[in-house]
Image: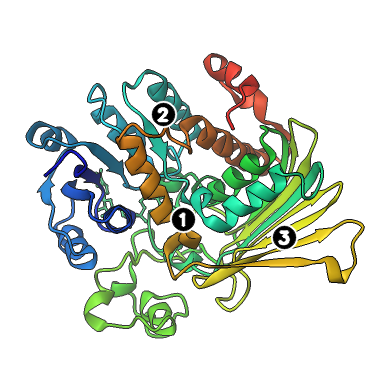
Amino acid sequence: MNKYHLKLGVIGWDGRGGRVARDGYDSTGGMLAPVAVVEPSDERYRKGCQRFEFEPRRYRTVQDMLAKEDLDCVLIATPNHFHLENLRDLKGSGLPILLEKPLDSSFEKICEVVRFATTYNGPILVGHSMRYAPILQEAKKMIARGDIGEVCSVRFVQHCHYGNGMFHNWRRTLAGSGGMFIEKATHDFDIMLWLLETWPATIAAFAGQQAFGGDKPADLRCRDCAERATCPESIQNTRWRAGQYKVEELEQCDDLCVFSSAVDIPDNEHTLIQFANGTFGTYVQWFFSPRSYHHRIYEVQGTAGALEVDLGAEFGGKILYCPRYGTLADQQEYKFDYLRRNHYNGDGEMMKHFYQVLRGEAVPATTVKQAFAAELLGYAANRAVIDKRYVSARELLPADLASLYTEKVY
Ligand SMILES: NC(=O)c1ccc[n+]([C@@H]2O[C@H](COP(=O)([O-])OP(=O)(O)OC[C@H]3O[C@@H](n4cnc5c(N)ncnc54)[C@H](O)[C@@H]3O)[C@@H](O)[C@H]2O)c1
């Protein structure tokens, strides 16, 4: 090992953890490699090793991993409601951390993560991987260059076709994920705030449970369900439609029933936002969209034109630029090939950046404070739905974090 070969410890292995570790290895030419993991499940440890083609040493606790390994950095990729706990286990270690979004699930714990980060003795990069995607970097550049003049408003939509998978696991409860305004929209809110460079001010929102949820037992799983062959949302049937059907794998999936009484979060959410700089916008996400429909569309309207980022699918996306006083002939379209890489080709770029942070060549570009701004917006939207009122984001801030709102975080 030379000084450029760095050792990664991963907390939460089979899922995002292994995938990001793999991307880190590939995008740095093997310079950043997972050598140790904390993973409670035997099955998921084994599966992760097979899927990601690494066999890191396995530990039961973060403390044990830290005591026995000489790590250079840590990735936290556990379900949302463990993030604060994982961070606290790293307290004092000073190891650079890549913390998966969102900061945690509840707003109280999200605020605790912000407090933790202000005293932590190492860099923390939040996994807002979409921000590193070349297509979104280009949109940011175009807006900053003034291509559409002064930005006035935004309209972001996420037609999510893989809601089924998320409602089969810990994401289906408020306690587990914080709801989809925190778990999923946080990516879109992060991009929105980064483009607008402001804080959320006033939020209205409506949401409903229209496809998932129901009265099936809280602990029912597809594997034990008599309707699994006919239920259109069973793991068996959704995997079949996606062309991933392997009998031996079905029982290893997260297969909690999507129609269970435990599902306590909406699956269709709409919000109207006024930002602190006077701009405004809308955001919509729903989780039962057809696979063949659009996925994410971001529109940005300005005094001199409009921009539409159609993030498309795994293959590629495009930016459409229309100048205000132009004609059809002045429209310009820029296409981006993602090379089938995850998050619009953002994950590998994020890991290259993390490697630079580890070598002291960069500071985190996606910070805890920025993630907090996006999650403050998500939490305000949750509150607006529950309380049936406009919510002032600023008024939600606890007194010790109130000054954050006047900080320029982008
Ligand atoms: N940046 C992104 O685009 C992106 C994409 C997907 C997921 N995520 C985030 O990554 C995190 C993990 O998501 P996922 O889809 O991989 O979930 P997952 O459930 O598929 O995987 C989580 C893993 O953590 C393990 N685990 C559970 N509790 C643990 C604990 N206390 N300590 C250590 N390991 C534990 C589980 O056994 C499992 O292997 C979530 O916070 C999620 O929001 C981010």
Sequence-earlier tag: 3 or 1: 3
* Image: 116 above or below 245: above
Mark 2, residues whose alpha carbon is within 10 Å: few (<14), some, or many (≥20)?
A: many
Asked if marks 1 and 2 touch (Cβ < 8 Å), the reply is: no
Tell me the SS state at disc 2: helix
Q: Position of residue 221 (x, y in %)?
A: 33, 67
* Image: 100 above or below 166: above
Q: So how many labels did they put on this image?
A: 3
Q: Is residue 67 visible?
A: yes
Locate the N terminus by quadrant.
Answer: top left
168 or 343: nearer the viewer: 343
Q: Name the residue under label 2.
A: 113
230 or 346: nearer the viewer: 346
- Amino acid bearing label 2: Val
101 or 331: nearer the viewer: 331
Disc 1 to disc 2, C-alpha distance: 24 Å
- Disc assigned to residue 61: none
- Disc assigned to residue 346: 1
Locate the C terminus by quadrant.
Answer: top right
Tell me the SS state at disc 1: loop
- Amino acid bearing label 3: Glu
> For the view shown, which residue lies furthest in the left direction?
68
- Amino acid bearing label 1: Gly
Is the distance from the Cβ of mark 1 to the nearest ligand 1 atom less than 8 Å?
Answer: no
Sequence-earlier tag: 1 or 2: 2
Mark 3, residues whose alpha carbon is within 10 Å: few (<14), some, or many (≥20)?
A: many
